[in-house]
Image: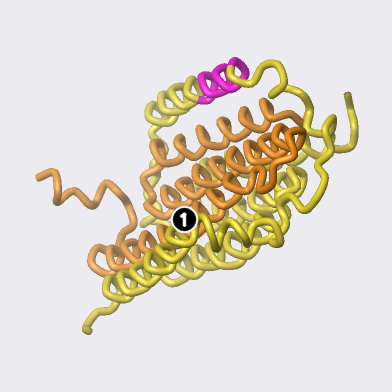
Chain colours: A yellow, B orange
Amino acid sequence: MGTLGDIVFALCALVCVTAAIGVVIQKNPVYSVVCLLPFFLGMTALLVLLQNTFLAAVLMIVYGGAILVLFLFVLMLINLSPEQLRADYSPWTYGLSALGVGMLAGAIAVFSRLGTNGDLGRPFAAVPLEGTFGSLNSLSRPLFQQFVVPFELISVLIVVAIVGAVLLTKKRI
Amino acid sequence: VFTLTNCLVLAGILFAVGAWGVIARRNLLIMLISLELMLNAVILAAAAFARMHAVTVQQTRQLHAGETGQILALFIIAVAAAEAVVGLAIVISLFRNRESVDARDVTELRQ
């Protein structure tokens, strides 16, 4: 109890949940996007804690570097005036959806507790990993052998997304 | 305590907060950001399962333990990036035509 990993995990969980709630309840979308930054930092720290180091690097680069900046860019591009930021704060919708979603979170928590008893419930720190888990070294072989078709399909998907974005936003082609 | 269970509970809470944002907010940008939150929760769950799988399989001396989960998370990140690009393109063209990013202003399909 109370090892360094546990403390860091609790800290990251707190940062992530607080930032996520901040994203949802901020009225101004700019503050929402700013709240997204500590969320991604916390997520990266959690992935490092799980020893998924390559995944953590990719998450930081793609989310923190690309998607966050893309959101901010679009936000500045469309430049909403305060009267366009109509209040979507109907307390009824807010309260009821929070209640329903809280029940969803409770159900997920209960089921994950029920499903991970016994061996699956022991702390990660109890069994240290050996070898190259989480490194690009260990990921590259399955990525280019077993999963090579989905990997190439991802590139097709990204090309389609780029073409679609250009077609959607260009006024006259 | 840093266990698989607590990682899954945290992922569930984050997913629920993202779902809350999609349900309660009417600003399309914030709905998109909340979608990203939900995808991130799934990435966290996949990473935690990958770690636990590696720990479990390590005792049987198998190679390539727990890499499938990480590759799943990698693919989720790629798909999320494509989704954000297309979603933001839709938001921009919507703003061009409507001067608004409010979901309540876009009701053609139900009329």
Please name the residue shown 56% across and 41% down the image: B41
Left or right: A55 in relation to B39: right
Give coordinates of residue A15: x percent, y percent: 71, 42
Residue B28 on the magenta segment: no
- Camera-side residue of A76 and B110: B110
- Camera-side residue of A171 and A121: A121
The magenta segment is A105-114
Which of the 4 image quadrants contains residue B23? top left
Please name the residue shown 77% across and 37% down the image: A9
Q: Quadrant of the C terminus of chain A?
A: bottom left
| Total residue callouts | 1
Query: Amino acid type of disc 1?
Result: Ala
Residue A111 on the magenta segment: yes
- Residue A18 appears anywhere in the view: no
Give coordinates of residue A125: x percent, y percent: 83, 33
Give coordinates of residue A154: x percent, y percent: 43, 63
Within 10 angstroms of label 1, few (less than 14), some, or many (20 or more) residues?
some
- Relative to A96, does residue A35 appear above or below in the rendering? below
Give coordinates of residue A146: x percent, y percent: 52, 55
Please name the residue shown 27% across and 70% down the image: A168
Task: State the SS at label 1.
Answer: helix
Please name the residue shown 38% across and 30% down the image: A93
Residue identifier under label 1:
B80
Left or right: A140 in relation to A87: right
The secondary structure that dominates the magenta segment is helix
- Residue B92 appears anywhere in the view: yes
- Camera-side residue of B87 and A49: A49
User: Label 1 marks which chain's residue?
Assistant: B
